[in-house]
Image (cartoon, rainbow, N blue to C red):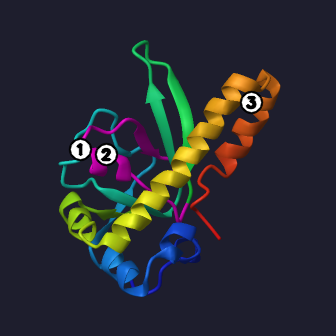
Amino acid sequence: FNALPKSVTNNRWFASLSASQQSALIRSSRSMVLSDGQLAMTQGQSVRKRRDGLLLLLDGSLKMSSTSAAGHEAILSYVHPGQWFGELALLDGLSRSRDVRSVGASEILVVEPEAFNELMKDASFARHVTELLAARTRMLLGLVEDFAMRSARARTARRIVLLAYDDDTRTT
């Protein structure tokens, strides 16, 4: 990974890491190419699976969704190049809560659980992961507030904006 795409280097969370942390994170990852429709992660899947871990979308687009028992899919968000995702199940040890599927061809970097756990031994890196979670928690609290306090029309408008720019940690 000689030259990282601008979408990665402009990611607010990645840019907040020290140069040595950035290097360690990228060095501990491996590339994986997904074809159109291929799953990067599956709802209910354990993160112990070798091809899973902390993920970074380098190129392409990924759809995060959930499927009801009746088979109805709800698209929750899209992952854009430069976005990191998948940290929650690594931290709490529970299974994946969403399906993440490639929309067209995509390339991701995978930091497998063992490598992620090694990186988390660095208190500063762990603090940065906490900040990533805090940013996502704030976004989710905003969605809860919208549901409780805004009209359906206002919620729809906000949801459209969030689908386009859903990760505040994505770029500077």
Q: Quadrant of residue 45?
A: top left
Disc 2 on helix, strand or loop?
helix
| Number of the label disc, if any, that sits on residue 93 | 1
Q: Amino acid at mark 3?
A: Arg
Q: What residue does disc 3 label?
A: 155
**Amino acid marked by disc 2:** Ala
From the viewer's perspective, is 137 left or right of 93? right
- Give the residue at x 51% y 60%: 83
Which stretch appears magenta? 81-105
Instruction: Answer with left or right where residue 97 lies relative to residue 162.
Output: left
**Residue 150 part of the magenta segment:** no
Front one among 145 and 51:
145
Looking at this view, name the residue that lies furthest to the top.
Answer: 70
Closer to the chain start, of discs 3 and 1, is 1
Give residue 89's mark: 2
State the image coordinates of residue 161 (x, y, percent, origin top left): 73, 44
* Residue 138 higher or lower than 26, as above or below: above
How far, Cα to Cα, is label 2 from label 3? 28 Å
- The quadrant of the rendering that contains the C terminus is bottom right
Q: Position of residue 130 (x, y in %)?
A: 42, 58
